[in-house]
Image: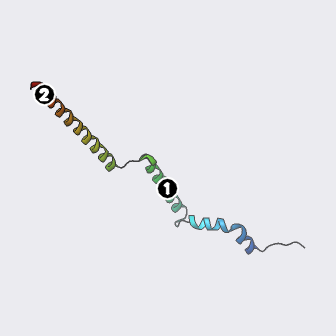
């Protein structure tokens, strides 16, 4: 006498994880719905890569960094001009 599990038991034990995964990936619209979903996934990935991926820096951050650099440069130029004026006046006296 051999023990043969019923088909219902077989499905629960061996097909449940794949059935849950299929339910997660289920897309309405048949094959065309799947094509559209895959196309959007590809476009999202392409946009991510073309925008710089994980090295992406927002424009606002770049503008803020440039403004800080300009302010530092302006401060340096003003200090240098002041030092030159002080040197020029001390030589006259």
- Spatial CA distance of label 1 from label 2 is 71 Å
Check disc 1 and report its element: helix, strand or loop: helix
The residue beneath circle 1 is 41
Q: Is residue 89 left or right of residue 6?
A: left
Tell me the quadrant of the picture where the C terminus can be found. Answer: top left
Please report the residue visible at 9 percent of the width from the left and 25 percent of the height from the top: 92
Please report the residue visible at 15 percent of the width from the left and 31 percent of the height from the top: 86
How packed mark 2 is, by other alpha carbons closer than 10 Å (few <14, some 14-19, many 20 or more), is few
Mark 1 vs 2, N-terminal side: 1
Q: Nearer the viewer, residue 35 or 17?
A: 17
How packed mark 1 is, by other alpha carbons closer than 10 Å (few <14, some 14-19, many 20 or more), is few
Q: Position of residue 90 (x, y in %)?
A: 13, 28
- Asked whether disc 1 touches disc 2, contact meaning CB atoms under 8 Å apart, the reply is no
The residue beneath circle 2 is 90
Q: Is residue 60 left or right of residue 41?
A: left
Please report the residue visible at 17 percent of the width from the left and 29 percent of the height from the top: 84
């Amino acid at each position: 006498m051999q023990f043969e599990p019923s088909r219902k038991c077989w499905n629960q034990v061996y097909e449940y994880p794949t059935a849950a995964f299929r339910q997660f990936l289920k897309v309405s619209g048949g094959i065309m719905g799947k094509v559209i979903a895959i196309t959007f996934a590809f476009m999202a990935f392409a946009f991510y890569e073309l925008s710089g991926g994980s090295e992406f820096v927002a424009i606002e951050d770049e503008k803020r960094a440039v403004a800080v650099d300009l302010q530092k440069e302006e401060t340096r130029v003003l200090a240098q001009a002041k030092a030159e004026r002080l040197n020029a006046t001390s030589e006259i006296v």
